[in-house]
């Protein structure tokens, strides 16, 4: 909703399009999102109707998330039309990555663990962090960065704004998150799921498995992706310090 407001404010989309999007989003969130949160209650002693409602409505959440995927195409067009020196290029790219992670992290990886029968075997094993890392940082972390950049763009001067630093930060944050999922979270999640289905969840969560050589090796495999990810965060911080310094102290 905030992005619809901002994009219409800077003239990237029409006010009518922004308004339709806001109404549609409210309708979908109220229609599926609220009841969808029951998926957190499946195996906490909830009555069967709660499990059924949670399963159906959170599966429905995937519909708006898929539709949001189309936002990627639309926003790429916004950036193309803005030209090479477009001031909002990187804030818009960060927003594009939000739509991407909405689709993959929340949509695909959320759906992966969403059916109650799957979560019966998979609750609290490493299939959850596949989804929670990619959805929580991928969607809300990157959205917060995108919104911050839209605001900062209005506060600091154009000369102090480094597209190059933002470009590296963008790729390190997204690349670090993607490689963390591919090289560590996904293999360790499926490794535990295999044992959960074969012998039961108690075994998948036992010290033999969670402190065993495979999970240890996969935890070490996160080292490089984590460093890449952290570099993205540091670069973003440096970008901000530099922009504030140049705008307010050097007055460029
Ligand atoms: C941007 C949206 C979303 C965010 C930020 C998000 C975030 C999270 C987080 C942080 C957890 C871990 C909670 C815990 O361990 O107690 C979680 C769990 C879960 N999420 Fe999502 N989620 C999102 C969307 C979805 C969607 C659309 C679905 C279904 C298609 C879904 C299905 C689940 C399920 C089933 C769990 C429970 C996993 C378990 O108990 O082991 N989530 N989510």
Image (cartoon, rainbow, N blue to C red):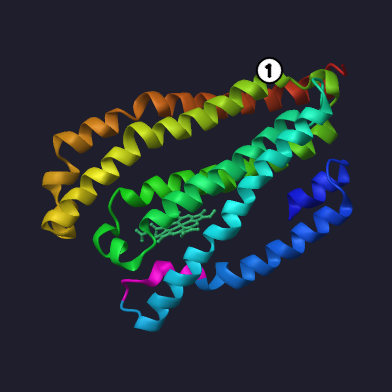
Instruction: Write the start and end of the magenta stretch as one range.
Output: 36-44
* Magenta run includes residue 169: no
Image quadrant holding the C terminus, namely top right
Q: Is residue 203 visible?
A: yes
Total numbered circles:
1
Residue 68 falls left or right of residue 125: right
Ligand 1: give its quadrant.
Answer: bottom left
Q: Nearer the viewer, residue 101 or 77?
A: 77
Residue 122 falls left or right of residue 137: left
* Residue depicted at x 28% and y 38%: 187
* Residue depicted at x 54% and y 48%: 103
Residue 17 falls left or right of residue 62: right
* Residue depicted at x 47% and y 34%: 177
Q: Quadrant of residue 96?
A: top right
Q: Quadrant of residue 159?
A: top right
* Magenta run includes residue 37: yes
Note whether 184 is above or below 239 in the view shown. Answer: below
Characterize the local packing of mark 1: few (<14), some (14-19) or many (20 or more) Cα atoms within 10 angstroms: few
Q: Percent from the top left, x then y, of residue 209? A: 15, 45
Note whether 157 is above or below 77 in the view shown. Answer: above
Image quadrant holding the N terminus, namely bottom right
Judging by the rendered image, the residue that carries numbered circle 1 is: 164
* Residue depicted at x 63% and y 71%: 30
């Amino acid at each position: 909703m905030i992005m619809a407001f901002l994009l219409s404010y800077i003239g990237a989309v029409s006010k009518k399009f922004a308004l339709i999007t806001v109404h549609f989003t409210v309708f979908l969130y109220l229609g599926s999102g609220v009841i969808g949160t029951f998926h957190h209650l499946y195996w906490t002693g909830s009555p069967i109707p709660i499990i059924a409602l949670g399963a159906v409505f959170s599966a429905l959440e995937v519909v708006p998330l898929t539709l949001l995927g189309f936002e990627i195409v639309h926003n790429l067009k916004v950036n193309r039309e803005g030209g090479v020196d477009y001031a909002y290029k990187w804030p818009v790219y960060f927003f594009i990555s939000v739509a991407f992670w909405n689709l993959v992290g929340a949509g695909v990886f959320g759906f992966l663990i969403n059916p109650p029968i799957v979560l019966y075997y998979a609750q609290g094993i490493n299939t959850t962090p596949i989804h929670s890392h990619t959805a929580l940082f991928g969607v809300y972390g990157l959205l917060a960065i995108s919104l911050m950049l839209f605001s900062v763009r209005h506060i600091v001067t154009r000369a102090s704004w480094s597209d190059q630093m933002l470009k590296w930060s963008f790729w390190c944050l997204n690349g670090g998150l993607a490689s963390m999922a591919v090289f560590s979270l996904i293999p360790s999640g499926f490794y535990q799921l295999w044992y959960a289905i074969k012998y039961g969840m108690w075994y998948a969560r036992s010290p033999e498995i969670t402190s065993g050589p495979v999970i240890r090796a996969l935890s070490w495999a996160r080292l490089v992706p984590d460093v890449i990810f952290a570099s993205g965060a540091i670069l973003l911080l440096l970008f901000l310090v530099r922009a504030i310094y140049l705008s307010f102290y050097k007055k460029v």
